[in-house]
Image: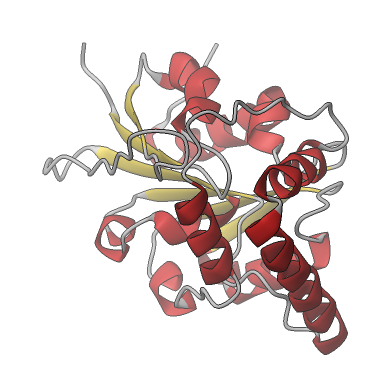
Amino acid sequence: MNLKGEIIAYHGWGFDRNCWKKWQEILSNNFQFKTYDRGYFGDDNSPQFNNISQKIKIIFAHSYGLHFCPVETLKKATLLILFNSFSEFHPENEKQRKRSKYGLKLMIDEFKNKPKTVLASFYQKCYYPFPSIEPNYKNFNWERLEQDLNRLNISKLDINILKKLSKIYIIHGLKDRIMIASHAQEFYKKLSQNSQYYEIKEAGHTLPFTNIKSCLSIVNQALGEIDNYGTD
């Protein structure tokens, strides 16, 4: 099979590689689809691009997943597709930033004593307006989840690295209860020269998993722009 290139997909906090299964099924005929795993629920996995310069190299990143992508891998990307993602979790607006920091602090403090309760609440907010998932708590790496939740409070990606990429697509769900739309728009404005921004009205924070059809339409447009790629 003559594949057009590679895709590496990064999940966000509280998720794993399995969230990308449907995407892998859809795109695997044209791309080698690799999935990163932070190791929250099992073994971790950190795939890399093959050293074939002429092949298309694409990164999918959901939410905090952008921050799990090594900078050297990010720099190799032909196309970066971001789903409800950010360079910094907290908004710049002072009032919104204060509210965001306070909310995350409450989440961090409660996680120490009631991690299952926090995670269940987090999933409900993520999947809104769709039904939440029922997590299996058998293999959770609570220590890593807590460490990354603390890192989220201070993690900040250098925007200049993103500006150097050839193409960035930002897709945001307007019913996101984790990251408000104005924050996503703020992020986009910093990247406007090499990026495109799309909003999906009926989608929440997990839009690449609950609104695959709408997201795929935008992704196919992006793929078509870089290599005349499309689906019938």
Toward the bottom, the furthest residue is 94
- Where residue 120 appears, as percent x and y from the top left, is 75, 39
For the N terminus, the image quarter is top left
x 60%, y 69%: residue: 192
Give percent across and percent down for residue 29.
36, 13
Among all residues in the image, which is located at the extreme front? 113
> Which of 218/87 is in front?
87
Q: Is residue 160 visible?
A: yes
Q: Quadrant of residue 108?
A: bottom right
Horizontal placement of 227 versus 72: left or right? right
Residue 131 sits above or below residue 61 on the image: above
Residue 129 position in % (x across, y down): 88, 35
**Residue closer to the observer: 113 or 183:** 113
Q: Would you say 162 lies left or right of 91 here?
A: left
**Residue 107: % across, % down:** 73, 62
Residue placed at 78% from the left, 30% from the top?
Answer: 132
Q: Name the quarter where the C terminus is drawn.
A: top right
Question: For the point 66% across and 26% down, which residue is it?
Answer: 212
